Image (cartoon, helix red, strand yellow):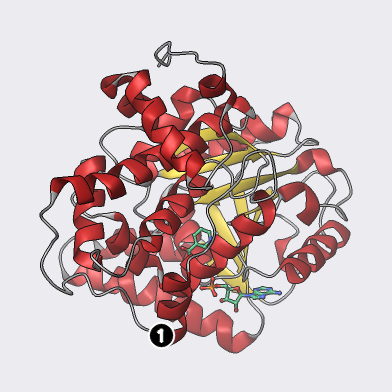
Amino acid sequence: MKDVKTVGIIGFGVMGAAIGLNAAANGYRVVYKEINDDLVKSMYDKFVTKPLSKRVGQGKMTQADMDKTCSMIKGTTTYKDLSACDLIIEAAVEKMDLKIQIFKELSDALPKDAIIVSNTSTFLIEKLMEKVANPERTAGLHYFFPANVNRLVEVINQKNTSEDTYKALMAFSKQNKKVPITVKDFPGFAINPIFISSYLVLNSFLGGKYNVATLEKVSQEVLGVKYGIMWVQNGSGLGTAYHAGTSMVEYLAKSEIGFPPVPNQLKQMFESGKLWNLEDGPVLQDPTERAVVGNSLLGSIFCISTHLIEKGVVSVKDLELGVCTALAWPKGPFTLMNEMGIDGALKRVKMAVEAGYFKMPRKFASGDLKPWDL
Ligand SMILES: NC(=O)c1ccc[n+]([C@@H]2O[C@H](COP(=O)([O-])OP(=O)(O)OC[C@H]3O[C@@H](n4cnc5c(N)ncnc54)[C@H](O)[C@@H]3O)[C@@H](O)[C@H]2O)c1
């Protein structure tokens, strides 16, 4: 297994910088590549000097620790300066052609045993790595926003990923105090299909008797969270939400899994440049009307979670851990199903299938009412 000591990061934006800071704080040397000298400097100022100085000013970090972390991070504009890196994490903008080109250039420029991974949110890893020599050293390493705080990392095995590469990435993630889960290459991987389908379903109810405040409240209640799905969607931005939703629909809507369509309500709000107004009126009190939303949301979560297991994308245990860690839900989808009883879950799954969000998962189609083995 490769002993990772030096990490290269391609693209030092929101995600790349947080990934680099996390690695530097845990003892790795970090070399990041940006497009030009101005960006090398401005990204360092924005994502390293400024936030760390603030922490020192607030007494949350010592000046000595800040100096040590800063000394571990260097910027460059050339691939040549990445030649000592054992692991390269690509976190450039989400454009497939650009990423494929970056991986080709990395493959040409670096030693053939450097591990190469992408932090893409939406593209299949196998496709991105198609021009990389020795694809057994490629994989996905998917961090979650904000990557310095959110502890989940999906370690994504594409069909060529070797056991050694996988083990090195698990060890690297643990050394960085992250919670890694093992995931197969699949559109959106394991967590995003659940989160994205949840907001698409919820957004589709907006209008008439359902305002944003009601949808937010219902999602808080059925999932037992302090911040509901509309709130979280605002955090990552409705542009990201819209594009990620569109991508998932393209990949899955016509497959044997299915996927809820992107509702006009989301498209319009994203195009208006605004965020959901979480205080847009009184919360609907009628329990029956609220249950329609809550049960549709849960049914959709149960459908996609079951499909992910049946497709072998992730294990029940890792999906529970992943959802609770990345999305901060107190209970994962399988615990929720077991607690309400599988017959109750089936009722909700049927609602999601009848609404056209998903195809019926095999477990429910076969009438298997055994609780999930957690
Ligand atoms: N923001 C999120 O919530 C989030 C979460 C998980 C994964 N991701 C994924 O992480 C990746 C980065 O997203 P982000 O939000 O940090 O974007 P960002 O726009 O903040 O940062 C991207 C950086 O890449 C740089 N860049 C572009 N082309 C480059 C090249 N050829 N060489 C070197 N640098 C280059 C840009 O200058 C920019 O600084 C995307 O693939 C995104 O899908 C984002």
Residue at 75% from the left image edge and 36% from the top image edge: 161
Which residue is nearer to you in this view: 214 or 68? 214
Q: How many marks?
A: 1
Residue 190, given in percent of the width and then of the height, sits at 54, 40
Which residue is nearer to you in this view: 261 or 159? 261
Q: Name the image quarter holding residue 236.
A: bottom left
Looking at the rendered structure, the secondary structure element under dot 1 is loop
**Does residue 219 sit above or below 15 in this rendering?**
above
Which residue is nearer to you in this view: 193 or 249? 249
Q: Does residue 115 appear to the left or right of 172 in the view shown?
A: right
Residue named by callout 1: 273
Q: Is residue 90 visible?
A: no
Q: Name the image quarter holding residue 102.
A: bottom right
**Disc 1 marks which amino acid?**
Gly
Quadrant into which the N terminus falls: top right
**Does residue 168 sit above or below 187 in this rendering?**
above
Q: Does residue 337 appear to the left or right of 16 in the view shown?
A: left
Within 10 Å of disc 1 (Cα), the crowding (few <14, some 14-19, many 20+) is few
**Does residue 117 sit above or below 349 in this rendering?**
below
Residue 156, given in percent of the width and then of the height, sits at 63, 40
Q: Residue furthest toward the bottom?
A: 38
Q: Does residue 38 appear to the left or right of 164 in the view shown?
A: left
Residue 284, given in percent of the width and then of the height, sits at 14, 59
Residue at 62% from the left image edge and 71% from the top image edge: 93
Q: Is residue 367 visible?
A: yes
Residue 5, given in percent of the width and then of the height, sits at 60, 45
Q: Name the image quarter holding residue 310.
A: top right
Q: Does residue 99 appear to the left or right of 238 in the view shown?
A: right
Ligand number 1: quarter of image: bottom right
Quadrant into which the C terminus falls: top left
